[in-house]
Amino acid sequence: MISSYNKHHVLNYENHIGRKIVLASRTIQDAFDLELRDKVGMTMAQWRVINALTTQNGITQREIADRLGLDSSSLIPLIDRLEAKELVERKSDRSDRRINRLYLTKKAEALLDPMHACVLSIRKILTRDIHGDHLEITEKVLERINENLVCHYGLYTKDNNIAVESTLAENSTSRKRIPTS
């Protein structure tokens, strides 16, 4: 049964800005994943771990999970695959052997330039035929949309991608994800 609200206020979800943002984000991620698989032989998820380590080599598995918005159960198999490819190395923390620190290998470092080329290729493709002024406006609009949601829902972000707390759901233990670029 259709509610009386829906009869009079039909929303066009196909053209809703939120849906378009999600679709664009997924398309960018899928295209980047294809580019990385084709040119470097790794997935976008693996690239995200490698990229986190380029920023700070030797961080813990927990720190990577937090940065990427993942839980340990999904991160550990990812790290296992990177280790099997000899792209990362786990080392026990000197002060606490229960903690593993991750380090890039020479093999991973040799892939950094081709990975960077994939980023530039995707960026070039996704901005093709879009004037620089329009890109600036788009960036500002997306930033404002994010700020509006963060402010309205009282979201506190960590590493620009995970809402770890909300004033509306302070008792909730679930994390809310904010799309990353």
Image: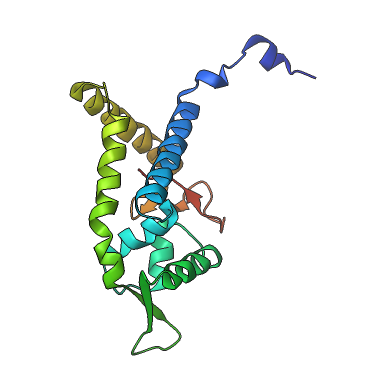
Quadrant holding the C terminus: top left
Q: Nearer the viewer, residue 125 or 170?
A: 125
Task: Examine the rendered structure and indicate whether residue 113 appears above or below residue 96.
Answer: above
Kindly tell me whether residue 179 is visible in this rendering. Answer: no
Q: Is residue 85 above or below residue 48?
A: below
Give the residue drawn at x 67%, y 16%: 6
Name, please, the residue furthest toward the right.
1
Q: Is residue 165 above or below residue 76?
A: above
Q: Where in the figure is residue 36, as x and y percent of width and height?
A: 37, 49
Residue 7, visible in the rendered structure: yes
Residue 144 found in image quarter: top left
In the figure, is residue 167 to the left or right of 140?
right
Q: Residue at x 56, y 16 (%)?
A: 12
User: Looking at the figure, which quarter contains the N terminus?
Assistant: top right
Residue 73: image location, x then y, percent: 56, 66
Q: Is 54 on the left or on the right of 44, as rendered?
A: left
Residue 90: image location, x then y, percent: 39, 79
Quarter of image, res 32: top left
Place of residue 100 in the rendered image (x, y in percent of width and height, measured from the top left): 41, 80
Q: How is the image coloured?
A: rainbow
